[in-house]
């Protein structure tokens, strides 16, 4: 075996977008899945939870935080998984239900991390439906439970985090020095209709459209001037936002001149390089990885699998075979995750 291959064998691998669910959230999701509705989250919920046909191939793996998951990690050389409550998390429930389930999920997550020391880290859930209580739970999750950041599944009731009502959430994350992972969910009502055909609503296209729109709203609104130290994470190779950086820069200046948006302190591309990191979850393209490293810097790209929705072995092979330097590989594989999510 070559020295280069040996380096891959000993490289620490931290996977940074790995989903789980607890039985109580699964049961609440199942109620939504079996009820009529037009939300583009419902097709996925039905595929996972509804009966018939019964248990999906994903549900057992989402519920398991012990045997199946650890065995998969061991078989593929994954050292740590950064766990987050699967989409749409608690964001389709009323505020009281959502707040209670987020608290319960965070407690269970902390217990799983304690059962498997060194193998798991965790992103805390919160209920944006009640921003004040969300901020309180965010503080508890970091300071009392020792979790490593937060996950939010894009919009809540068709609203985005640039809305002033959600600023307590952004303020809490910035004060705690904890990154918010903006994970996809079905598109908000205003984006939904063109995505209902051909399976476009899901990971093929709609999830990226929804989440990239959220990210660009945060940039274009000027929110990141108010919260300059806020750190945000986008999966799926950044939902392609950084591909548009030049055009975002050019058009945002024009928009400000026309009175279509505020004047920002920085160019959009500078917010991408200051306030955002991205992960490779579910987009195993060496060409896209090369572009992302060149556009954002290797210190802003993190490896991920998207377990159990994506298979582990190809994600590991993608990282190991990427035509990047050993220093870049170490950053993407584990050093960035250790820094951004405070993983020992």
Image: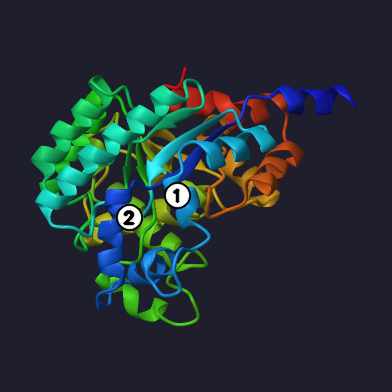
Q: What residue occupies the far bottom of the structure in this picture? A: 197
* Visible residue check, residue 253: no
Residue nearest the observer in this picture, 239 or 136: 136
Residue at (50% x, 49% y) in the render: 61
Quadrant showing the N terminus:
top right
Task: Say whether disc 1 or disc 2 marks the residue closer to the N-terminus.
Answer: 2
Q: Mark 1 near mark 2, Cβ–Cβ under 8 Å?
A: yes
Q: What residue occupies the far top of the structure in this picture? A: 344
From the top left corner, tell me how far across and down residue 172 is, in percent.
19, 31
Residue at (68% x, 40% y) in the render: 316
Residue nearest the observer in this picture, 148 or 28: 28
Considering only vertical position in the picture, is 99 above or below 241? above
What SS does tag 2 mark? Answer: helix
What SS does tag 1 mark? Answer: helix
Considering only vertical position in the picture, is 3 above or below 200? above
Q: CA distance from mark 1 to mark 2?
A: 9 Å
Locate residue 139 relative to residue 86 in the image: left or right: left
- Category of crowding for the residue at label 2, using alpha-carbon neighbours closer than 10 angstroms: few (below 14), some (14–19), many (at least 20): some
Q: Return the residue at label 2.
A: 26
The image's mark for residue 62 is 1
Locate residue 148 relative to residue 16 in the image: left or right: left
Residue nearest the observer in this picture, 25 or 188: 25
Residue at (25% x, 66% y) in the render: 31
From the top left corner, tell me how far across and down residue 277 is, in percent.
45, 37
Residue 137: quarter of image: top left
Residue at (23% x, 55% y) in the render: 91
Considering only vertical position in the picture, is 159 above or below 103? below
């Amino acid at each position: 075996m070559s020295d280069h291959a040996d380096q891959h064998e000993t490289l620490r691998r931290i996977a940074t977008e790995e989903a789980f669910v607890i039985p109580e959230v699964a049961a609440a999701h199942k109620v939504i899945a079996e009820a009529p509705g037009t939300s583009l989250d419902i097709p996925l919920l039905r595929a996972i939870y509804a009966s018939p046909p019964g248990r999906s191939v994903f549900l057992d793996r989402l519920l398991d935080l012990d045997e199946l998951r650890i065995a998969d990690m061991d078989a593929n050389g994954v050292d740590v998984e950064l766990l987050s409550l699967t989409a749409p998390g608690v964001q389709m429930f009323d505020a009281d239900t959502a707040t209670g389930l987020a608290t319960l999920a965070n407690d269970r997550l902390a217990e799983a991390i304690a059962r498997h020391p060194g193998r798991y880290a965790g992103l805390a859930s919160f209920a944006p439906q009640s921003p004040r209580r969300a901020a309180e739970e965010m503080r508890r999750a970091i300071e009392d439970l020792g979790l490593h950041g937060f996950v939010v599944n894009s919009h809540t009731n068709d609203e985005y985090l640039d809305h002033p009502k959600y600023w307590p959430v952004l303020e809490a994350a910035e004060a705690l020095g904890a990154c918010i992972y903006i994970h996809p969910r079905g598109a908000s009502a205003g984006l939904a209709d063109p995505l209902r055909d051909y399976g476009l609503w899901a990971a093929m296209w709609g999830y990226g459209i929804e989440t990239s729109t959220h990210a660009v709203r945060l940039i274009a609104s000027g929110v990141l001037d108010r919260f300059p130290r806020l750190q945000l994470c986008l999966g799926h190779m950044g939902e392609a936002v950084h591909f548009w950086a030049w055009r975002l820069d050019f058009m945002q200046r024009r928009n400000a001149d026309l009175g279509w948006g505020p004047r920002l302190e920085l160019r959009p591309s500078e917010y991408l390089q200051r306030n955002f990191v991205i992960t490779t979850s579910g987009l195993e393209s060496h060409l896209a990885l090369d572009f992302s490293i060149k556009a954002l810097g290797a210190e802003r790209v993190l490896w991920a699998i998207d377990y159990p929705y994506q298979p582990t072995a190809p994600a590991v092979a993608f990282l190991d075979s990427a035509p990047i330097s050993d220093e870049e590989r170490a950053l993407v594989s584990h050093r960035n995750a250790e820094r951004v999510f405070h993983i020992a």
